[in-house]
Image: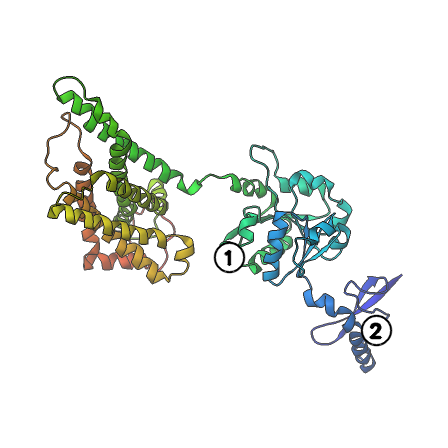
Amino acid sequence: MVFPSYSITQDGLPVILHHTGGKTSEGRITGLISSSHSSDDMELTEQLVEAGQDHDDQDNEWGDRRVILVGSGDMTRALAPSLLRAHYRPVVATRKPNRARTWMSQEVEVCTLEEGLAQGDLVVVAIPAIHHHTLPKHLFTNKIIVDISNRYPGETQKVSLAEALQEMLPEAQVVKAFNTLSAYVLEREELYCGREVPVCGGTTFARARVMALVRDMGMVPVDKGGLKNARTLEEIPFQFFPEWKVAFIVTGIIFAFFWTIKFFRSQICYNLQKDGDWDWGVFEKLPLSNTQNALAFTGCLLLLLCYIPGMIAAYLQLWRGTKYSRFPGWLDTWLKSRKQLGLLSLLTGCTHGCLAIFLNINWHQAISWTQSIYITCGVLLAAVMTILGVTSLPSVSVKLTWREFSVVQRYLGWISVILLTSHLTFLSILGLMRPLSCYFLLSGPQIMVPVCFLTLMFKIPLVLPCIDSRLTKIRRGYERHNPTDSDNQMPKLIP
């Protein structure tokens, strides 16, 4: 038999909601009530609301803020406190509730699967994917299921784990989320706050519900569309330094280049140019001296590579007269790798400094004024690069204002280039004009000092007021009209 249940609209008028049974899903008393707007109906409205108020107090306290966590492993133990901090009510549903209660907080409700899944429609399945087939399918009907599982390393599948779970539970809506975060991160609010969390799958409503949960937990949800995109999401945890790939390759090539030059100049050419038998003793310097020398010039060139692409981009914008024209692909990749190049420059420079202490300092010998300036510039350079490296870290940069960050990265950055130039110049002020080794091999300073001065020389025009003001206008949206613009230019914006 169908009974119409009573509800109230925003304007206070009664309406009829048909529902099967003796009470609605919210637990309110039902009865056959007319939808007319008489005074008798309004009196009955007040009586019904008062009768159902006490019964609903506990349910309305949490409303839709219950999140059912299936499983009692590390991810559940990490998610439960995070949900509590976000003012949600986590309910742990497990086959062994008595054991789970021993390590769960008293604020977290622990119950059986049947009891837990009956309390809400937002369910986080926090068990390994190999156990998904053991889930009781009939209990997941009309649920929004958040799949946080990842495949094991080395496994290959044609479909994602989330798609497989959706096939197992066709009456539910599976949404992929949280698989890019570890239990260690989820246990520490300072680590996960502000992090991006990709979300995909389910209906638009189901995805929006999960994204709201992510947002309430202090993270940034990123909508990745349908469930097929879960294949991409499940590959993210297995990526190996994707943003560092270019920087690592460039660093390796530069280090190999300078190490080879040092090897030929100090070991091979030395023996070729001397009379008599080969001096094998010079090869003993390979592990320490050659490595220290190669690290020094690798760090120097990496530092310059952080600022050269910015100058190229500035000259391109001045030439094109707009900031809306796309940069070439190689320049765009270079610009995106500047942070990684800078941190590797700091690493190689500091390693060079430590090795140089053991190689070059002789406390029983007076040093010249050029050596004093060289050492001073080197120490100051290390300090400035440390500041640049630390402020580029997300946990530090997020605490800085835009002006603070730009001043540090821009002005201290170019101060580091000036210190680098001084450091190299005073290091090799007497050796820059030495003859080439083996008739063709330049030394590290003979390569790097000209590069440093060329970098500064091309920077000087950009700081002139007449050019700097025009560049500032372009970066604020001004465009110089040019009827012969290339086809790859993006649509112009009116300043």
- Tell me the element at label 2: loop
Q: Residue at x 59, y 57 (%)?
A: 82
Quarter of the figure with the N terminus: bottom right
- Tell me the element at label 1: loop
Residue position for label 1? 193
Three-letter code for the amino acid on which mark 2 is drawn: Ser
Neighbor class of circle 2 (other Cα within 10 Å; few <14, some 14-19, many 20+) is some
- Percent across and percent down for residue 479 are 30, 56
- Looking at the image, which is closer to me, 487 or 378? 378
Rounded to the nearest whole Å, what is the CA distance between mark 1 and mark 2? Answer: 51 Å
- Percent across and percent down for residue 379 are 24, 50
- Looking at the image, which is closer to me, 74 or 124? 74
In the rendered structure, the answer to whether residue 20 lies left or right of residue 76 reads: right
Give the mark toward the camera: 1 or 2.
1
Q: Work out whether residue 482 can be spotted.
A: no
Q: Residue at x 43, y 55 (%)?
A: 395
Residue position for label 2? 34
Q: Work out whether residue 69 can be spotted.
A: yes
Three-letter code for the amino acid on which mark 1 is drawn: Cys
Neighbor class of circle 1 (other Cα within 10 Å; few <14, some 14-19, many 20+) is some
In the rendered structure, the answer to whether residue 193 lies left or right of residue 298 reads: right
